[in-house]
Image (spheres, rainbow, N blue to C red):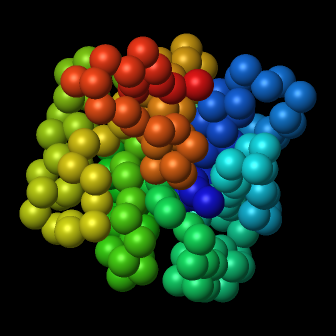
Amino acid sequence: MVCFIGRSNVGKSSLIKALFSLTPEVEVRVSKTPGHTKKMNFFRVGKAFTLVDMPGYGHRAPRDFVEMVEPYLYSRKNLVRTFLLVDGSVGLQKADLVALEMCEETRCPYVIVVTKIDKCGRGALLTNLLNLQEVVNSQTTGCFPQPFLISSIHYWGIHLLRCFVAHVTGSVRLKDTSQGGKDANQCH
Ligand SMILES: Nc1nc2c(ncn2[C@@H]2O[C@H](COP(=O)(O)OP(=O)(O)OP(=O)(O)O)[C@@H](O)[C@H]2O)c(=O)[nH]1
Ligand SMILES: [Mg+2]
């Protein structure tokens, strides 16, 4: 099981929708209005694993976010990764730092996903990324060192993230390439 958390409007539902773009029958609802996703939504991927779309926190988030999400992160034994989404066009916000701290406390390995990288200029994105990297290097222990950069609208970075999710959920077997196995490093 993997879950996606982040401020409301950061693009959680859009990202899950993009990850499922090859299976359009899976319906993921996104909205321009922050606070759209009000409860946890579970998306089962065959028998392999489940993705969880969380309500957002921060501005206009459902008030029971803390009561709903925090206990979930602490108690789910089969949660293999948490994906913490940060809006690349605005950079780290106070609420993101709170979420980062929560992820550190749960001791479940987590990964930062930088969203909406299409939305701002390269200079601003670079500044936001360098600041993020600095915080990750100096203030975290359970965070995957490299953030994933994505745009759900243009599908940038989506395939790589799909492969990563398949890998951490044990849905893809990596073979030793030196054996000449022809399906080494395969990702579906
Ligand atoms: N430009 C751009 N806009 C995006 C991207 N991803 C999401 N958006 C827009 O951001 C808005 C919010 O997207 P959602 O996916 O509903 O955000 P959310 O994090 O699920 O929000 P809540 O459910 O309210 O917590 C929508 O208008 C999306 O179209 C992206 O990669 N690029
Ligand atoms: Mg949502």
Determine the residue located farthest toward the front in the rendered image. 179
Q: State left or right for residue 168 relative to residue 13.
A: left
Q: State left or right for residue 128 relative to residue 3.
A: left
Q: Residue at x 53, y 51 (%)?
A: 169
Tell me if residue 118 can be seen: no
Q: Residue at x 25, y 42 (%)?
A: 146
Q: Quadrant of the C terminus?
A: top right
Q: State left or right for residue 72 relative to residue 120.
A: right
Spot occupied by residue 130 in the image (x, y as percentages of width and height): 15, 40
Nearer to the camera, 23 or 147: 23
Q: Residue at x 21, y 67 (%)?
A: 140
- Give the quadrant of residue 110: bottom left
Tell me if residue 4 can be seen: yes
Spot occupied by residue 120 in the image (x, y as percentages of width and height): 38, 22
Nearer to the camera, 170 or 107: 170
Q: Is residue 53 above or below residue 183?
A: below
Nearer to the camera, 145 or 7: 145
- Give the quadrant of residue 40: bottom right
Q: Is residue 112 above or below residue 187?
A: below
Q: Residue at x 55, y 18 (%)?
A: 155
Q: Is residue 10 above or below residue 75?
A: above
- Give the quadrant of residue 106: bottom left
Q: Quadrant of the N terminus?
A: bottom right
The number of numbered badges drawn on the structure is 0
Spot occupied by residue 55 in the image (x, y as percentages of width and height): 68, 61
Nearer to the camera, 80 or 91: 80
